[in-house]
Image (tube, rainbow, N blue to C red):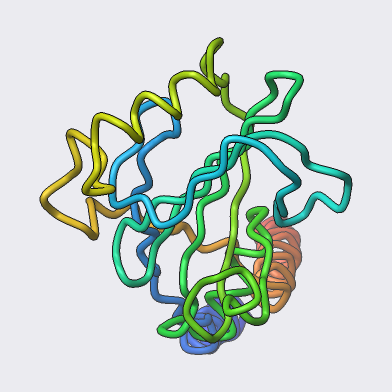
């Protein structure tokens, strides 16, 4: 009887190991912060209404967009009240549907067509976070435009892709059910083995 239980558990473990999804970790590009922007300025407005993905309210203030690479862009928006929003844009052309879903689970927003936002055509992913705007934002924007006519941000990275961080897999429901089933089978096997071994 013990041999049969061990055989059944071993078979279950082998089947579970073969059925476990092979989710490769996608690398997420590293984005600088709006406090220390890098890249090339592609758009800059000292005032006006601006779009911020995921925020359907009125966004009035200054907005600067930096191209970091062909697939990554950073938007730095400073509202008139001093609240800042940094939005990281990542072209999703090379991502699978599963990788996009993992990123969505982590708070990224899908923008179906970047062309509507002045970017390359196709699907983009965005991730927004707050940041502290400079106190004299409008005067800083004007003076930086006058001192740097090329549009390049001083101190820009020579590696447009930047370093990458690993994207952790969040798993899926099949894996969760499999682990729960393995736990239940292990408990049952333990009770059976204990019952058999008792005199």
Residue 28's x, y, as percent? 39, 59
Res 59 quadrant in image: top right
Residue 155: % across, % down: 17, 34
Q: Residue at x 75, y 46 (%)?
A: 49
Taking the image as shown, residue 145 lies to the left or right of residue 184, namely: left
Number of numbered markers: 0
Q: Is residue 65 above or below residue 48?
A: below
Q: Residue at x 46, y 73 (%)?
A: 91
Q: Is residue 159 above or below residue 13?
A: above
Q: Is residue 132 left or right of residue 68?
A: right
Q: Residue at x 49, y 77 (%)?
A: 92
Identified at 56% across, 43% down, the residue is 45
Front residue of 187 and 4: 187
Left or right of 91, for residue 103: right
- Compared to residue 1, the image places residue 127 above or below, namely above
State the residue in front, 183 or 6: 183
Looking at this view, name the residue that lies furthest to the left: 158
> Residue lying farthest front?
146
Residue extending farthest top: 135
- Where residue 121 appears, as percent x and y from the top left, is 52, 85
The N terminus, quarter of image = bottom right
Q: Pick the quarter of the image with the C terminus.
A: bottom right
Given residues 172 and 57, the one toward you in this image is 57
């Amino acid at each position: 009887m013990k041999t049969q239980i061990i055989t059944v558990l071993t078979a279950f473990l082998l089947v579970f190991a073969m059925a476990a999804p092979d989710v490769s970790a996608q690398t997420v590009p590293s984005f600088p912060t709006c406090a220390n922007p890098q890249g090339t300025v592609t758009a800059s407005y000292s005032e006006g209404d601006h779009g911020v993905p995921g925020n359907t309210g009125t966004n009035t203030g200054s907005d600067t967009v930096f191209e970091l690479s062909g697939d990554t862009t950073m938007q730095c928006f400073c509202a008139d009240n001093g609240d800042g929003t940094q939005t990281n844009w990542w072209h999703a052309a090379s991502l699978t549907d599963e990788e996009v879903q993992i990123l969505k689970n982590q708070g990224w927003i899908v923008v179906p067509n970047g062309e509507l936002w002045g970017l390359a055509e196709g699907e983009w992913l965005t991730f927004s976070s707050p940041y502290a705007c400079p106190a004299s934002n409008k005067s800083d924007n004007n003076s930086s435009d006058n001192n740097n006519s090329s549009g390049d941000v001083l101190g820009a990275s020579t590696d447009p892709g930047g370093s990458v961080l690993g994207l952790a897999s969040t798993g899926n429901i099949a894996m969760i059910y499999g682990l729960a089933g393995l736990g239940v089978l292990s408990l049952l096997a333990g009770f059976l083995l204990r019952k058999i071994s008792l005199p």
